[in-house]
Image (cartoon, rainbow, N blue to C red):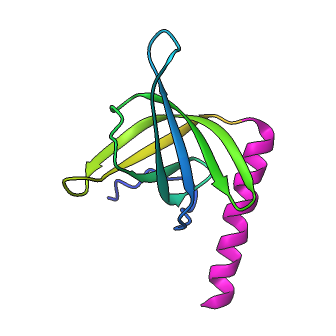
């Protein structure tokens, strides 16, 4: 039995992302940048040099082409890649309808391109 819980396809694409972590009082605790390793309509896998604690609520400024999406999520996965970099999985928790549509369009566009090039 597979432990795969993803419900939407992941697009392996590198994009810049700014990550803001907030403390329990709602004040910004950390600011760091990274890059996406893959993205779906449900979340994103990031590579960065500054780890963010598991279960932290983060705000992401995600660059997709010429658009910047502001999304909120929860850190659900952490992995050390080497002595300097880590990998982090963020599940989106708050997406406005416009960002849902933009993410769905992005994923669909790259799925179609992958099928056409196969």
Which region of the structure is painted magenta?
A: 96-118
Please state the total of marks drawn on the protein image: 0
Q: Nearer the viewer, residue 27 or 45?
A: 27
Q: Name the residue rendered at 66%, 72% in the picture.
A: 110
Pick whichever, 71 or 111, lies toward us: 71
**Residue 39 on the magenta segment:** no
**Which percent across, then down, holds residue 36?**
50, 57
Look at the image and tell me in which quarter the N terminus lies. Answer: bottom left
In the rendered view, does 6 fall on the left or right side of 82?
Answer: right
Relative placement, left or right, of 76 versus 106 is left
Q: Is residue 99 magenta?
A: yes
The image position of residue 77, as x and y in percent, is 35, 43
| Residue in the foreground of this view, choosing between 82 and 94 | 82
Question: Residue at the location (67% across, 57% down)?
Answer: 64
Q: Position of residue 49 (x, y in %)?
A: 34, 48
Quadrant location, the C terminus = bottom right
Residue at image point 63% right, 38% down: 71
- Of 22 and 33, nearer the camera is 33
């Amino acid at each position: 039995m597979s432990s795969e819980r993803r419900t939407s396809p992941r697009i392996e694409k590198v994009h810049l992302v700014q990550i803001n972590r907030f403390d329990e009082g709602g004040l910004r605790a950390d600011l760091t940048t990274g890059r996406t390793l893959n993205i779906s309509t449900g979340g994103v896998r990031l590579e960065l040099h500054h780890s963010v604690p598991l279960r932290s609520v983060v705000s992401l400024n995600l660059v997709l082409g010429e658009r910047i999406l502001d999304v909120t999520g929860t850190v659900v996965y952490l992995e050390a890649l080497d002595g300097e970099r880590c990998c982090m999985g963020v599940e989106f928790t708050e997406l406005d309808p416009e960002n849902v549509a933009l993410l769905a369009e992005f994923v669909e566009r790259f799925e179609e391109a992958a099928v056409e090039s196969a």
